Amino acid sequence: MNPQLRTAGLFVLLTGILVGIGYLAGYFLGNSMEFVILFLGFAIFVNLFAYFFSDRIVLWSYGARIVERHQYPRLFSIVEDAAHRANIPMPRVAVIPVQTPNAFATGRNPKNATVAVTEGILALLNDKELAGVIAHEVSHIKNRDILVMTIASVIAAAISIIARFVFYSMFYGGRKDREVSPLILAIAVVAAITLPIAAMLVQLAISRAREYKADATGARLIRNPMALADALRKLDKGVKRRPMTTGNPATSSLFIVNPFSASTIVNLLSTHPPIEKRIAKLEEMARKYEYL
């Protein structure tokens, strides 16, 4: 699907769900239209805020600093080459002062994008492997994946917060003018419980699909799938050895690999597909196109 249509669809979905939850809350509190208007305004605010400021917040939360070419000539050369191959403007380059090896891209469109890498990844990977990682992140910029995932995260967070509000309003601020039917009450309870879970599953599905696509696109850009496969192996081991201790786990989907330590159960709901499967797809790609 066209990236712009995906983004617009997520905006519409967020607005529609929040307005619907607002109507449900108003039904129990006796002010349906007032709540619909209130939640519509809230949805518009969330959409605009996520669109214009989410990238700055993410960079700030990880202490990323924008750097210049003379400070990191090796990194700039690799980013510039990947951007040229992808036919996008040169993104800003940021470095995160942590030793956990990782990278991510952020920005609402190719003209307002940033590629951020940690000090740890610069020390861990050789030039070919780093080029694979950067090509992966540049692919996200080209496809506007980062904006889509930001909106998906906003949807999940907003639905969870508002659904919880509606759930409590049913029991502590319900309508006094007439009795609420058991069926309506049961539907509201089920919706309050299942909507956040459904939003989370949608977020996971979108994130996992985009990772496979960015792997394939990035490998084609540099015409070297095995370089990215080797980088993923090193990053997986590096993160397990030194997981990130700062930042918000809700933003883990932005990174090329999950930067936080996680249990087996949490891994089942990870925003990233298993490293083994990503590497296997890249190895299959290398054999198919005879890059080896």
Image: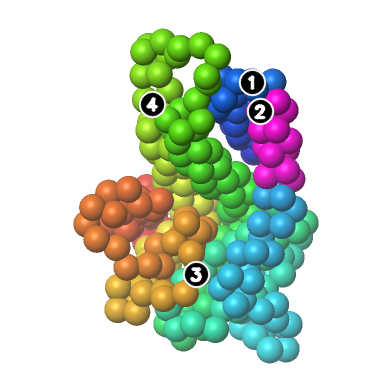
Which of 289 and 11 lies nearest the eye of the viewer?
11
Separation of marks 2 and 4 at Cα, in angstroms: 18 Å
Disc 2 secondary structure class: helix
Is 109 positioned to the left or the right of 255 in the image? right
Which residue is labeled 2 in the image?
35
Q: Earlier in the sequence, mark 3 or mark 4?
A: 4
Label disc, if present, on residue 247 of the rendered structure: 3
Identified by mark 3, the residue type is Gly
Which residue does the image show at 37% across and 25% down from the upper left? 190
Which of 8 and 282 lies nearest the eye of the viewer?
8
Separation of marks 3 and 1 at Cα, in angstroms: 38 Å
Image x and y of residue 12, in percent: 65, 29
Which residue is labeled 1 in the image?
32
- Can you say which quadrant of the picture contains the C terminus? bottom left
Label disc, if present, on residue 189 of the rendered structure: 4
Q: Quadrant of residue 5?
A: top right
